[in-house]
Image (tube, helix red, strand yellow):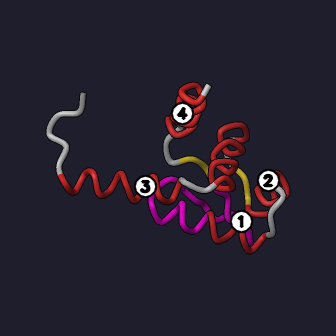
Amino acid sequence: MLEGLTESDTQRVAELLKVLAHPDRLKIINSLSQHRELNVTSIQEQITISQSLASHHLVKMSEKGILTKVRRGNEIYYSLADPILAEWLTLLLKIQR
């Protein structure tokens, strides 16, 4: 049971869930949980979406602190900010079975 959950907490969680509530974004989490770190091209190829759409999703997820990014030369590499996100996804799938 969650104790001391404030209105601000519930609002932040709702906003986070809103960002995650897209199949492509869940696929990105899955890909990053398997590969740890990927650039935009690798992500878009793995989940078969356009590069511009992949970039859009990555920006949204980065803004909410779901992903971290690091620049290496001309490439930006993304990773999960916290590996617990992949565990969370696994738990949600178990609930649905």
For the residue pair 53 and 34, the one nearer the viewer reads as 53
Discs 2/4, front: 4
Q: CA distance from mark 4 to mark 3?
A: 15 Å
For the residue marked with disc 2, what is the amino acid?
Ile
**Which residue position holds label 1?**
54
- Residue 16, which numbered label? 3
Whether residue 73 is visible to the viewer of this picture, yes or no, is no
Label 4 Cα crowd, 10 Å radius (few <14 / some 14-19 / many 20+)? few
Task: Name which of mark 1 and mark 4 comes first in the sequence.
Answer: 1
Residues tagged 1 and 2 counted as in contact (Cβ below 8 A)? yes
Q: CA distance from mark 3 to mark 1?
A: 18 Å
Discs 3/1, front: 3
Say if the magenta span includes residue 36. no
Label 2 Cα crowd, 10 Å radius (few <14 / some 14-19 / many 20+)? some
Task: Name which of mark 4 and mark 3 comes first in the sequence.
Answer: 3
For the residue marked with disc 4, what is the amino acid?
Leu
For label 4, the SS is helix
For label 3, the SS is helix
Specify start and end residues of the magenta stretch as a single range.
Answer: 58-78
